Amino acid sequence: RLEVLNVRFNEISMQIPTQFGNLTSLQHLNLENNVLTGEVPSELGQLDNLESLHLSINVDLGGTLPPSLASISTLEFLNIFVTKIENVQAVCDAGSRIRFFVASCRRPDVTCTCCTSCCDGDRESISCVLAT
């Protein structure tokens, strides 16, 4: 049974496979700093044991976050900064229990009232501040 999948910094160029939603024992999924494209698949919302999800620094990953992510009661860490993900505030509005939520919330088109930090930049230079 797979509990940790860490493939960060591998230059993986693809969409996030919907089949990841079948990895029901998964607790930690780290896909940061790759070249992921497309949207975050709604199937990730089926990962009831997920504690951390790291999608940061995938500059072509966009779309909207599946609302089902906010309902994962075990999810404590969500990192989606330096992406094109748009509906960051939806996670806050859904009453998420995420303790550490880092997004690109300094962009003028992004609102995030429950983010703990805001990070922006590109693959070479990232600047972060604590959210207020």
Image (cartoon, grey):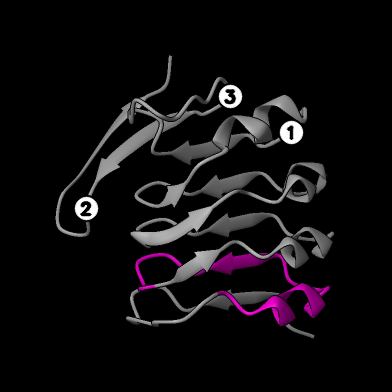
Specify which label sits upstream in the sequence, 3 or 1: 1
Dividing the picture into quadrants, the one containing residue 106 is: top left
> Label 1 amino acid?
Ser
Dividing the picture into quadrants, the one containing residue 45 is: bottom right
User: Magenta stretch containing residue 98, yes or no?
Assistant: no
> Label 2 amino acid?
Asp
For image coordinates 81% across by 73% down, the residue present is 25
User: What numbered label is drawn on residue 96?
Assistant: 1
Discs 1, 2 touching: Cβ within 8 Å: no
Label 2 crowd bin: few (<14), some (14–19), many (20+), radius 10 Å: some
Discs 3, 1 touching: Cβ within 8 Å: yes
For image coordinates 38% across by 38% down, the residue present is 104
Residue carrying label 3: 114
Q: Main secondary structure of the magenta part?
A: loop
Question: Helix or strand or loop: what does disc 2 sit on?
Answer: loop
The image position of residue 126, as x and y in percent, is: 22, 46
Dividing the picture into quadrants, the one containing residue 5 is: bottom right
Specify which label sits upstream in the sequence, 2 or 3: 3
Q: Which residues are magenta?
A: 16-35
Up the image or down, 20 lies above or below 113; here it is below
Camera-near label (1 vs 2) is 2
Disc 2 to disc 3, C-alpha distance = 23 Å
Discs 2, 3 touching: Cβ within 8 Å: no
Residue carrying label 2: 122
Quadrant in which the C terminus appears: top left
- State left or right for residue 51 relative to residue 81: right
- State left or right for residue 12 relative to residue 85: left
Up the image or down, 17 lies above or below 36; here it is below
The image position of residue 36, as x and y in percent, is: 43, 72
For image coordinates 35% across by 82% down, the residue present is 10
Question: Helix or strand or loop: what does disc 1 sit on?
Answer: loop
